[in-house]
Image (cartoon, rainbow, N blue to C red):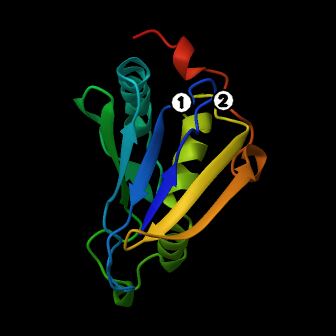
């Protein structure tokens, strides 16, 4: 399954990202979820620097990998569930955190952390397209306030390289 978010950053309409989920069993630790960012080289490079703030932050049940700039206009970042470590749910792990990490789309966690940790200003409306096996499943738009409050102040296009 993948979730495409075409223009989540305020002031930059041609930079978006896709989160890609791989199939897995319910009772195994969640696999890393890669986020692939694509856009014009300059704002994408600036975004890579800002995303480093997310990888340095320490949440209790998940982590962000270091962002990797693959080339002009392409960055990869991964969401890493850390709610149960190498255990299985049968081992008495923190099931509440595991279930929250599993059912809450990584897109929402990412957008929250962009605003709350990196102080990055997001678009007022967030559009998402969900697909599975390359077939569209759903498309919707949400006001940013339904995802995260407050919004960040730092504009991506205003950040120095």
Tell whether 100 sits left or right of 81. Answer: right
Residue 152: assigned label: 2
Q: Can you say whether 97 is above or below 48 in the image?
A: below
Q: Is residue 54 above or below residue 10?
A: below
Residue marked by disc 1:
118
Q: Identify which residue is drawn at 47% across, 55% down.
A: 60
Dot 1 and dot 2 residues touching (CB under 8 Å): yes
Q: Residue at x 43, y 51 (%)?
A: 18
Q: Secondary structure at mark 1?
A: loop
Q: Is residue 20 visible?
A: yes
Q: Is residue 156 shown above or below 105? A: above
Looking at the picture, how far across and down is residue 21, in whole percent? 37, 66
Residue sitting at 58 percent across and 39 percent down? 8
Query: Residue 93: x percent and y percent?
Result: 41, 79
Q: Quadrant of the N terminus?
A: bottom left
As drawn, the label of residue 37 is none
């Amino acid at each position: 399954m993948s979730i495409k978010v075409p223009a989540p950053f305020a002031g930059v309409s041609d930079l978006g990202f896709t989160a890609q989920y791989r199939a897995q069993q319910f009772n195994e630790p969640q696999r890393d979820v890669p986020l692939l960012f694509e856009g014009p080289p300059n704002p994408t490079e600036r975004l890579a620097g800002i995303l480093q703030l997310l990888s340095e932050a320490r949440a209790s049940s998940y982590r962000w990998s270091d962002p990797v700039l693959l080339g002009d206009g392409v960055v990869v970042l991964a969401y890493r569930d850390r709610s149960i470590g190498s255990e299985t749910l049968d081992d008495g792990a923190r099931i509440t955190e595991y279930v929250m990490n599993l059912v809450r789309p990584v897109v929402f966690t990412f957008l929250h952390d962009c605003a709350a940790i990196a102080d990055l200003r997001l678009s007022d409306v967030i559009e998402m397209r969900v697909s599975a096996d390359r077939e569209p499943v759903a498309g919707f738009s949400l006001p940013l306030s339904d995802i995260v409050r407050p919004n960040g102040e730092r504009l991506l296009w205003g950040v120095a390289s």
